[in-house]
Image (cartoon, grey):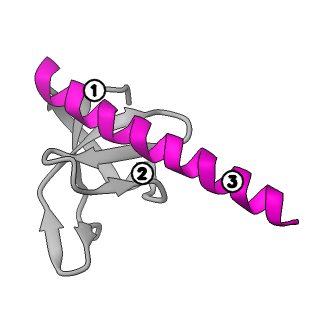
Amino acid sequence: MNVGDVVIPKKGHYLKSGCEVYGYAVVVSEVPFIMVSEETDMLWSCFPIEGVKVVGVAPEVMLKECLKRYKKWEERKTKNEVCENNRQ
């Protein structure tokens, strides 16, 4: 599986958030395995890689948007880690 692959959930797995279910996602990181929804409104960082299968490759424009979302998440995560470390 590579960055930019479009994946769908295998039987018994679901790409969801709250009550919303997503049909597919775009891989934005291989290690750790992270996916983003097409609309970039959802990011999965704890989904099992064996729970999805590759069905294609994201168009360049879609991949760019998904990677932007991932970078924002990474920046926020890093800031939160810094804040946590400062509290100790």
The kind of residue on which mark 1 rests is: Gly
The kind of residue on which mark 2 rests is: Glu
Residue occupied by mark 3: 81
Q: Residue furthest top?
A: 60
Left or right, 78 with reference to 70 = right
Residue 77 seen anywhere in this rendered image of the structure: yes
Relative to 58, residue 73 above or below: below
Relative to 62, residue 16 above or below: below
- Foreground label between 1 and 3: 3
Rendered image quadrant of residue 10: bottom left
Question: Where's the N terminus, which quadrant?
Answer: top left
Packing grade of label 2 (10 A; few <14, some 14-19, many >=20) is: few
Indicate which disc, 1 or 3, sits on the residue closer to the N terminus.
Answer: 1
Packing grade of label 3 (10 A; few <14, some 14-19, many >=20) is: few
Q: Nearer the viewer, residue 18 or 55?
A: 18
State the mark number for residue 4.
1
Relative to 9, residue 13 above or below: below
Residue occupied by mark 2: 50
The kind of residue on which mark 3 rests is: Glu
Residue 59 seen anywhere in this rendered image of the structure: no
Indicate which disc, 2 or 3, sits on the residue closer to the N terminus.
Answer: 2
* Magenta stretch: includes residue 78: yes
Q: Nearer the viewer, residue 20 or 87?
A: 87
Q: Secondary structure at mark 3?
A: helix
**Magenta segment:** 59-88
Indicate which disc, 1 or 2, sits on the residue closer to the N terminus.
Answer: 1
How far across and how far down the image is residue 60, in percent? 15, 18
How far across and how far down the image is residue 68, in percent? 31, 33
- Give the CA distance from mark 1 to mark 3: 27 Å
* Magenta stretch: includes residue 11: no
